Image (cartoon, helix red, strand yellow):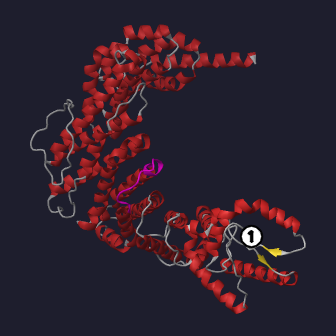
Amino acid sequence: MTGHMEKSKYEASELVKVINNSLANSKTCNFGLELLQNLLPHCSNEILMENILHWTSYCIVQHKEDTLRELRLNTLARIIENSDHLEGFNKKFVTEYLSATLRICLVHRSDEEDVAALNCLMQCMKKYPSWFGNHKQKVESFLIECLDSSYEFLAETAAATFVCFLETGPAGQNGTNYVANFNKSFKRICATIHKLFNNFLNESSGQYYFAKIDEDVLEFKKLGGDIPSPSNLDVVTKRIINCLIFIKFLIVKKFSVEKRIEPKYLIDIVCRGLSIHICSSASAMLKSIGDHSVYLKKVQFHLLSIFRVYIKRFYTSLIPFSVVIENIFLNLLQRDHNKCDCFIVDMSFRASVYKSLSSWLSASTIINNELQYQEKLISIIFKDIMSPRRTMLLSVTDSNNKNADDRSLILINREIMYVQALDTLNSLVLSSFLFDQNLLKEVLLFILGRLNNSQRDKVDPVCNSTLCQVKLHEVLISLIKIEHSVALPSLHFIVNLLQRGLMNQNWKISQMSRQGLDILEKISQPLCPSLHVSTTQSAFQDAHRNNLLLDEHEETSQKSKNKCDKEINIISNILINTPNETLSEEPEHSFVSTEIEQDTAMESQEEDTPVVSVSVSHEKEVRQDVNQEDSTASVAELDNMFCSFQDVVQE
């Protein structure tokens, strides 16, 4: 063991020598910096204490034109990250190196170098937050300038750095200053987005009313010329998207104190941006308007993404806005049916709408929030999944002038949209309480038809993928197991379809088919099936419910006295359900009761089964006394009736 430790120390010391020699040589300095980045997380305290100041001196950028600037800043960030336990180094770094590091980081170069500068700046603010109290204005200006970048990864890194920036300077008692920083910055960014919307939307029709935010906005460089010009639209779009990325990171990133987010501000931004539509097909002849439509769609993609992120973390705060949220989704889904074909030709946005709506429906189920427009939403989704020919023809027509890659992308987007629509439909079925029964029956028949066509290898341009088949089975299972389901159109057909699904090679489909058969078995053949004797059965059960507990003791004593007298007790747990499991209390049996009653009546007539008469007493349990000679025959006849009923249910 000792020999192994000595060998490891020797190898580490040799590796340190290689790094130091490489750093000292300008030709091999880049190799030394890369090797140092990989070594730092594994260095012992002894090696760090001996060499960390020496390594830091090589990581400080001496001039702006340094070709190794990105590599030096990344290595310096790794040094600061691994120096938590080195108090002497931290004190010396603050006094000798931190000012120079900040000065180098706040210089814009290429996107890659700016990312490295932001990473280094982030580590410095995490390690020395109080030092940045006097430099907040310079850091904030640098971060705002990053909002003009078209490099999305740079914007995300700047957003993460901005969250760390809010926790710099004096924290105050219980972090009150940090709470105020977060609240003020969130409102400032929201106000900035509204101001950018004013320029971007340019008083478009369908403006959404929003509450004014009493907060200063972020200051950008002024744009030249008119706002609607393509170059200016591109800049404004990048600023809006990057501001939305900042809001997303404010929601997602960990914060040391309480986050105070007012959902009204976020809902106003999302609803205002989604309420506008510029038809790309109608404006194809006007290139500027066509570009405007493309930029707007990019912004709306990010709005839907932020909405999904917020739902996952703070969905309970959205309960007061549930009607507004459902209304905006309803308008989005109705848009292409009523006005244009924009979202059918390009189905990626429609798939994103369905994905966001599905997230909201899942949250509504958790908080038991009753939906207001569930039937309208189901009707629209049903139209989307029921009319694939129109969707396919529009997609193919639009893709005639495109290459093969573009056409394949269109087909992929169409499949994604279809899957998301089915997923949303499944969430609606599971989360809603009131339905149009005729509409549900149409949906069920459509699902059964699609699955039947797929199992019989009939060509289906939309539902031919395995993922679509899985989603169709999920919707079918949800429709079967909901308590308020309509009468199933053909129980025999559904059973056969699910039995064929058991043999599917896809494990998921096979398991769901088994689940569906189990549900149908519980509905059609419960553990204690009821014996259909006559219309007086319900009155008989009511009398039995009232007298069972009172006469239980009397029944036991009476049986012990009359051992020789054989009786047939019509009220039995074997023949009739217990009071808690009566037919009137199980609505899910209603859709098979008529068929069973008819078949049972026919078999009763054919077999000439004697009718059992029942009389009701006020306080005593009803019994039918028969002679000892006839008891054996009566029991046999009742057994035959019971067996024939089971056969009917199983068929």
Can residue 240 be seen here?
A: yes
The secondary element bearing badge 1 is classed as loop
Which of these two is toward me, 638 or 415? 638
**Looking at the image, which residue sits at the far left?**
225
Answer yes or no: is residue 502 visible. Answer: no
Quarter holding the N terminus? top right
Q: Nearer the viewer, residue 111 or 250?
A: 250
Question: Is residue 37 highlighted in magenta?
Answer: no
Q: On the image, which quarter does residue 66 sit in?
A: top left
Q: Vertically, is 380 above or below 457?
A: above
Quadrant in which the C terminus is drawn:
bottom right
Q: Which residue position holds label 1?
A: 574
**x, y percentage for residue 564?**
90, 73
Residue beneath the point at 36% across and 28% down: 163
Residue at 19 percent across and 44 percent down: it is 197
Query: In the displayed image of the protein, which residue is found farthest to the front?
Result: 618
Q: Identify the image quadrant of residue 342.
A: bottom left
Where is residue 615? Give x, y as percent. Answer: 68, 77
Image side of residue 366 versus residue 524, left or right: left
Q: Is residue 227 left or right of residue 448?
A: left
Q: What range of the chain is rendered magenta?
A: 363-374
- x and y, in percent, of residue 488 in the image: 53, 74
Q: Going 26% across and 43% down the picture, which residue do you hit?
A: 269
Above or below: residue 534 compared with residue 309? below
Residue placed farthest to the right in the image?
564
**Is 551 located above or below residue 320 in the figure?**
below
Residue at 60 percent across and 75 percent down: it is: 495
